[in-house]
Image: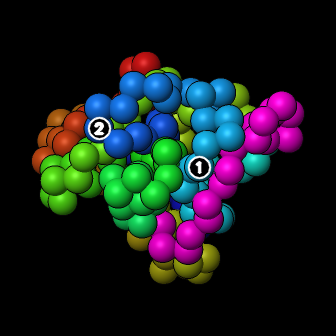
Amino acid sequence: IYTKEINNYTARKLVVKKGRNDIHSLDDLKGKKMALTANSEMSRIVRAFNETADVPIDIVYNDKGSVENLNQVATGRVDAAGEYVYVTDAFQRMMGMPVEAVGSFLKLNGQAFLDTHFLLRKDENSQKLADRLDEDLKTMRADGTLKKLSVQFLGADYTVEPEE
């Protein structure tokens, strides 16, 4: 069961080592290395890009997720990664790693932003919980609490679609 109310929006951008200015798009990554988590929507974006690219992006898969992707960028083992903007920002703030999000938001099937919902087990009790979460999310959005929590814990307001 998914909640009906959106709790935040996620969007991905390319991430490069801080100060690098030669990469702003997937086209700029042709023939270069890019770190990806195998089962992410970012890997689907890059695989689709590679299907028509004259020179494909060299994909370096890992199974450890965003932190490993960003670590590979920061240490220069790959040229870029594609990560959620708020994850990149948190990685910079908390770990002091020299990475930055660049370029436009990356799109999957024409969509740049993914709305995020809570996922619960499919049963009667979970439906009651989903209904309560929906009520609380509506209240928190209306009184500004959801935005406040997003800024406090994610570093920006991700309760609305990010601006390009």
Pick out the residue farthest to the top.
164
Between 91 and 41, which is closer to the camera in this rendering? 91
Residue that numbered label 2 is attached to:
18
Q: Residue at x 50, y 53 (%)?
A: 78
- Could you tell me how far apart the alpha carbons at marks 2 and 1 are, in whole angstroms? 16 Å
Q: Residue at x 68, y 35 (%)?
A: 30
**Label 1 crowd (10 A; few <14 / some 14-19 / many >=20):** some
Residue that numbered label 1 is attached to:
33
Left or right: 155, with 18 as reference point:
left
Split into 4 quadrants, where in the image is the C terminus? top left
Residue 116 in the image, given as x and y percentages of width and height: 48, 50
Secondary structure beneath label 1: strand
Q: How is the image coloured?
A: rainbow
Between 15 and 2, which is closer to the camera in this rendering? 15
Identified by mark 1, the residue type is Lys
Q: Is residue 77 magenta?
A: no
The correct choice, above or below, for 159 with respect to 42 in the image is above
Quadrant in the picture for residue 69: bottom left
Left or right: 55, with 64 as reference point:
right
Q: How many marks?
A: 2
